[in-house]
Image: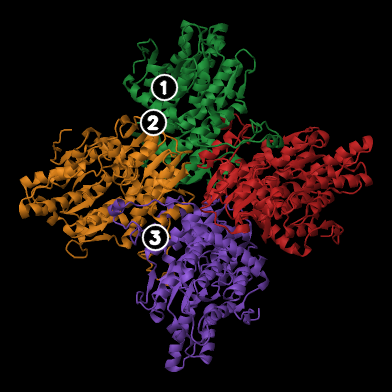
Chain colours: A orange, B green, C red, D purple
Amino acid sequence: MALLVEKTTSGREYKVKDMSQADFGRLEIELAEVEMPGLMACRTEFGPSQPFKGAKITGSLHMTIQTAVLIETLTALGAEVRWCSCNIFSTQDHAAAAIARDSAAVFAWKGETLQEYWWCTERALDWGPGGGPDLIVDDGGDATLLIHEGVKAEEEYAKDGTVPDPTSTDNVEFQLVLGIIKESLKTDPTKHTKMKERLVGVSEETTTGVKRLTRCKLMELCFSQLPNVNDSVTKSKFDNLYGCRHSLPDGLMRATDVMIAGKVAVVAGYGDVGKGCAMSLKQAGARVIVTEIDPICALQALMEGLQVLTLEDVVADADIFVTTTGNKDIIMVDHMRKMKNNAIVCNIGHFDNEIDMLGLETFPGVKRITIKPQTDRWVFPDTNSGIIVLAEGRLMNLGCATGHPSVVMSCSFTNQVIAQLELWNEKSSGKYEKKVYVLPKHLDEKVAALHLGKLGAKLTKLSKDQADYINVPVEGPYKPVHYRY
Amino acid sequence: MALLVEKTTSGREYKVKDMSQADFGRLEIELAEVEMPGLMACRTEFGPSQPFKGAKITGSLHMTIQTAVLIETLTALGAEVRWCSCNIFSTQDHAAAAIARDSAAVFAWKGETLQEYWWCTERALDWGPGGGPDLIVDDGGDATLLIHEGVKAEEEYAKDGTVPDPTSTDNVEFQLVLGIIKESLKTDPTKHTKMKERLVGVSEETTTGVKRLTRCKLMELCFSQLPNVNDSVTKSKFDNLYGCRHSLPDGLMRATDVMIAGKVAVVAGYGDVGKGCAMSLKQAGARVIVTEIDPICALQALMEGLQVLTLEDVVADADIFVTTTGNKDIIMVDHMRKMKNNAIVCNIGHFDNEIDMLGLETFPGVKRITIKPQTDRWVFPDTNSGIIVLAEGRLMNLGCATGHPSVVMSCSFTNQVIAQLELWNEKSSGKYEKKVYVLPKHLDEKVAALHLGKLGAKLTKLSKDQADYINVPVEGPYKPVHYRY
Amino acid sequence: MALLVEKTTSGREYKVKDMSQADFGRLEIELAEVEMPGLMACRTEFGPSQPFKGAKITGSLHMTIQTAVLIETLTALGAEVRWCSCNIFSTQDHAAAAIARDSAAVFAWKGETLQEYWWCTERALDWGPGGGPDLIVDDGGDATLLIHEGVKAEEEYAKDGTVPDPTSTDNVEFQLVLGIIKESLKTDPTKHTKMKERLVGVSEETTTGVKRLTRCKLMELCFSQLPNVNDSVTKSKFDNLYGCRHSLPDGLMRATDVMIAGKVAVVAGYGDVGKGCAMSLKQAGARVIVTEIDPICALQALMEGLQVLTLEDVVADADIFVTTTGNKDIIMVDHMRKMKNNAIVCNIGHFDNEIDMLGLETFPGVKRITIKPQTDRWVFPDTNSGIIVLAEGRLMNLGCATGHPSVVMSCSFTNQVIAQLELWNEKSSGKYEKKVYVLPKHLDEKVAALHLGKLGAKLTKLSKDQADYINVPVEGPYKPVHYRY
Amino acid sequence: MALLVEKTTSGREYKVKDMSQADFGRLEIELAEVEMPGLMACRTEFGPSQPFKGAKITGSLHMTIQTAVLIETLTALGAEVRWCSCNIFSTQDHAAAAIARDSAAVFAWKGETLQEYWWCTERALDWGPGGGPDLIVDDGGDATLLIHEGVKAEEEYAKDGTVPDPTSTDNVEFQLVLGIIKESLKTDPTKHTKMKERLVGVSEETTTGVKRLTRCKLMELCFSQLPNVNDSVTKSKFDNLYGCRHSLPDGLMRATDVMIAGKVAVVAGYGDVGKGCAMSLKQAGARVIVTEIDPICALQALMEGLQVLTLEDVVADADIFVTTTGNKDIIMVDHMRKMKNNAIVCNIGHFDNEIDMLGLETFPGVKRITIKPQTDRWVFPDTNSGIIVLAEGRLMNLGCATGHPSVVMSCSFTNQVIAQLELWNEKSSGKYEKKVYVLPKHLDEKVAALHLGKLGAKLTKLSKDQADYINVPVEGPYKPVHYRY
């Protein structure tokens, strides 16, 4: 695709696959709104006061129908928004088209190349000469990373004229990041530094992104605050657990039409995502084996009747392999070679380095047969036996299906809206320092409460006497911070 | 689509949507073969002796990838095959293309009109002047019905020149059937009678088809034998139960992307199909309510923790409605008007008369908004509230997803192959009279056994002493005929 | 215990453990009545007309609280009743005491010796000089067997004076049977023949009993009719399946207090009983492995995510072993020697020959440590490792817990009452020949219907039009005879 | 029972029900040891160095078989131990007898009066004139409370001679506490103050106890440290969740023999205990309705397919009511009057004030019929309808069954041992201040790891590279403190 920014008649920038899908996107957005009561309640509650008036928000988060409802909630609250996807396969083109036409600047399509991906990220951050966005909604940390690396390079360049060298790294993706920054140094050697200065804060969606922020010490370099949406209960225990319980079998079915019942499935990692995956596979009739490093999670798996073994123990016997660890190098090409013919290998953890795609692609004589987009059969030359890899090792629920369903994303995204509001409202108060915060529990409970009515639930009310007895306010929050749910 | 028969270079007739999808179809057929060990074992065991040499087989059964493996098993055993689908939405176009190019005459595409549907059925039965097929693989009984009605009309025509009058019925589909027969009387007034005389037998796939055969007393009019595949345990307890457990959520997800967890779902009917549906909805986190007429099935539902109520009790509270009864007039337009906004209404029973589509379509002022093919929102004029109807009330797992997975269809279709073989081999022996038969239990057990190895199971062997003690042969069959599994 | 018949003040014979428990028994009987709506409905419907007036009924069936409600339903309908248990451990002494005091002649206590057991059976059949009972309620066929063997011996004795020789068999229990008959020949050489002549019919409770009746061709020798309660759906699919799902974990917990979660459990046999057991173990968090001889049942297990292996494959790895086969020689002493220390071994099939208790008891140097009644640890001399055997290999749910709960027994026993009524009402009509019958389906549906109200269910009613469409009467029965539920 | 301390031949004090049950207790203790690998591993690892040499430990915790293994682990590590139960019904008399005979001073029996209960607590704290224990293992906080109230009274007494007035409170139990303290002031007006001064720390078992400690600000008054075992993951997520999943149905079955399938069950509270209860009831085939005050927990219940309503909505329809809230006044007598006949009412939360037993007992004309110990039917005079209350409203799993199974208590109690060790080892280091601590995560992970081998699990090992990538040590701990599992 030619990488040229297009413009709507109203002058809004965009780059999407097919603008004619906008009507279809709009219909599905309207359906999703009914399933996303938390976001709709935010529009009702906050819309009139336009709290985001003047705020420029960049999002780097799967450009799906659900995300469209998030974006239009942000704009309904007064924000100006630019958006890209955080995964090359996760965009739903009709969602992107509807948003591009009606609401915000979008740069995203299903099946981007890595180069296109980073071009889109750059566009979403490009608010013109005045610097970057006021706020970032990030998922996995790529938008934040680009600014971070930009600032680092600009500091070195200012010191001694050093220019980043893309050939200094083996990581293909990082080569592209360095290339972008190298290019920007030519036109504006303080571009990212100005972005950093303008930026009020980031709200991050995933465990992986939070780990990355902490690991890279991104926050020390940049930004005043970093609320962490991932660790809200209504995110981690809903999106990760129940979302994956829904979308893992969805992705498997759409990609392969394979019967899950009667199969042996290996789930690598038994965190929230792994728990959701194992639950749905077990309930669909698979025999599930878990691999774990953490003895507590391993014991939880045992209590649910799941076997806990190492990948080596079961690599030759299982039919389905799912990685959920958030770590890297989980399934290597040597594992894949030992698998049964047509074993399915997929990843539902954030990044695509859980599966050794590089090892697979470069294995001598290996043959790739694309059954359909995001479903490839890789055949090893010696055995003539093949494995089926979904979404090229990337998030299979977004690559092969449509990601998490609306109602679960409504929880996650209501957290995002509330986090962004908190950041914006407190931008001058000094309430948040340069570190990773979790949203306060009363906001977490509020997100949950906004979803109960739609699902027909009726809460019991504490009496004052009972509230005193357990030492909580009548109106909550009801649990200590460390409570595990 | 212009209704013209096309021909391959080798001269085989066909009519499919897009021949260029044949390669894609072939790839998926190859994947499915690995998941269909029963059919592949039939090829290995029977292929060399070519038992179907000289047999002409017509099939009227969803033209999917799995059916493609069935068709190619029949041809691998020596048969000549012509095929149509038994549902206007259930054809997978790439499967049809691959078969048309490589193996058999196919007349089927996704999204036929009713007129096109019956044209396809007629083509599949059209073996030229010498009469019709030797054997029929039927699903729902439409191919059988056409011959049956043809014979009836030809008898009356022979008696007194009476010609069927399409305007004599309100049933749109039956009008088309009568029209076809009326037309054929003009060119060949004994066409269907000749078909009937040639026909050795029919093997029928579904409960609905079996009921229809019995109800219409079809067998008294025609054919020497009617083995009934549906009542094999390896069909009714696998395809109906486990197949639907898999494909109901698959269809719901693909059509609506809606979260099943937290929803209230009503399953009308708690037979094998209803049990599979209720199980998968419950396991996905829905609260399931069952409607039943049979007190035994109702008690079974209660024992699984499901509520048993009438549709009227819950019509305003539920989010998802699924009909599985095999009966008609289950969800009427008056029910639909009382439903919540965006309630999902779908059918997984064989025929589309479980849901009152006619009542809906003709409701004054109702508005149909097609979200995407097979997913329509119907908005009532007074309330401005809408419901979502899947696959126009037809089989939603085939209309909105890809039907049952390969391994479960391997059980069903291995029964079909064995039934067809039994019919063909015993065609002159008088073993089967004009009635509905169930396959002998040792063949049912054989079908099961053919699938165990692929799933890693190891059977225990009876000792002679143990076999004597429970009074069964060492090699089976192991259960009395009435055993319920 | 001294084997002397005692008498109540009203002159009714009995022999129970402790008459002072009658009040406790009565309280629990009253609780059970609330849970047994089917039996209570029989009292309401049939009580006034006293249909059993003049009928003498002998029962050989676990003398529990639930059976007490059955007995008092029979007496409420006018019958005179004598009862014994069909298992040496299954009597609940408070139930026996209450019945003995208030309603019927009872000969049963928990922990009978085999000799006591057969003495009790003899007493229950002893209706004085006029011959035996008019009707038998049998469970496992022991009462029937005694008459059958008696008749056989009396025929041979009449022919040539042959007297049965107890030493002619290794089977300890059969030695006792022959001894009893030998003794009766001395006092009345036509005792059992007279019994046979008086007997109208038997209704049999279990699969095992039915098999035994068929196997021994008992029915050819004796009796005019043998309705078979076991094969009613409301028996086989409720008592066997849901009853065992409830009572297996109950027995395990009461006997051993062991955590089921995290354990590996082997279920031998995947019939209705095995399905119930596997389901409850899986749901309690065990990893369940099934052993099976029947490929269809094996495939069903696989579809539920259970592993299917042979006992040899897993004998050293599992923690819990349950036999449910109805066959013999399932777990032999050589298996037990290979088990883990404190592996639990138990049987929930009808007879105690599924586990090789003889092999265990006679293993050289084996040591038995009784933890508490019905819970023994057997230590092998060489390894000093032990296994825990429940209820001495007999029905563990009755030996270690209280058997199936009332509501499920209400289904089974309502079948018994209806079967006995059918036998008695048709005693002169010739409706039933000398073979095993299943109750007609409309009675089966009636049993189910009697239980729905209590559980809050509301049935849907067929319209006449719908009933015609599926070709059933509006009021049922709704399914063909072969339907599998 | 006469409240006189008895002595073993070796001079150890005790008061138990029946010393002749010691052998039976010892057999069950030996069985439990095999199921409690964590405690046995502690004996192996720490036994040789006798770390508790010189430590006097008082325990107030259900005197069961599992607790016996805990006590003997403490003594195996060198401690001297005195023990009482923390619930009047939870003692297993054979466990108490075995410990009293062989290992420690025990004051506990099943079915204590409240007066006896507090006498036992006093005895367990009575280490003679030198003050109280060095360490307390508390469960619910009663032992701690007694010291706390004692100190408070002694301070007031020292100030102005005020003596506590038992008539100043309506709470019967608190009257007894004040009575005991009043009495002790006469003989030793600094008894509890001396206890407080000697006391190194308390490890508390339950949520309720922790809340109570916090609520009463007990820790400000007394003691240097208060590690909180309840909030270890291997306690809260195992004992509370999986323990109750096991023991709730166990208690229901033993107390009532009622079928859970087909029933409507209300679970008040959806914390860890409520989750375990709801899960087991659902899996046993009940329809489960949850009452909750916390919107997050309510949303979790919905995601599992459970209905969330208020008690008022369902009080007349449900069959089983279980309180799990840790709060008070959940089911009041006015609720109970509206329930169905023979509805079962029970509590599995720590204290007996969840159910309004006082309201029930004092209801005019109410009649109590004791079916068997811990199972009472209460009949209301006007309706003649009754409800069944288990364990007099106290912990039903301990009152009606034997509490949690060994393996789950092994997790909890290994935490206790490690907490006690930590307290004792750090008694002079100042590591712990006067507040409630959670055990460090590496110890939590260690507890889990000690149980994996017994359950056949194999952990995966992180490579150094992977550990660096996710920023954790190779050997753990693997999760941030706030991780929710």
Q: Secondary structure at mark 1?
A: helix
The CA distance from mark 2 to mark 1 is 44 Å
Front of the two marks 3 and 2: 2
Specify the quadrant of the image occupied by residue C165.
Answer: top right
What's the distance in space between the residues labelled 3 and 1, CA to CA? 57 Å
Expressed as whole percent of the image width and height from the top left, the position of residue C151 reads 86, 39
> Residue A57: x and y, percent?
19, 51
Q: Residues within 10 Å of mark 1 (few under 14, many from 20)?
A: some
Residue under mark 3: which chain is it in? A
Residue B191's place in the image compared with D117, above or below, is: above
For residue A484, which numbered disc appears in the image?
Answer: 3
SS class of the residue under badge 3? loop
Q: Nearer the viewer, mark 3 or mark 1?
A: 3
Q: Quadrant of the C terminus of chain C?
A: top right
Kindly identify the amino acid type of the residue bearing the numbered disc 2.
Ser
Subunit ID for the residue under disc 1: B
Q: Nearer the viewer, residue D23 or A201?
A: D23
Q: Measuring 53% from the left and 23% from the top, which residue is drawn there?
A: B416
Is residue D402 visible in this depiction of the protein? yes
Q: In the visual, does D117 lie left or right of C169?
A: left
Instruction: Name the amino acid type tagged 3.
Output: Arg
Q: Is residue D48 above or below residue B342?
A: below
Q: Residue at x 47, y 17 (%)?
A: B75
In the rendered image, residue B151, in percent from the top left (x then y), is placed at 54, 12
Disc 2 packing (10 Å; few <14; some 14–19; many ≥20): some
The residue beneath circle 1 is: B114
Is B74 or A342 nearer to us in this picture? A342
Q: Does residue D344 appear left or right of residue B251 in this picture?
A: right
Res C14 → quadrant: bottom right
A371 or A289, nearer to the observer: A289
Residue holding disc 2? A385
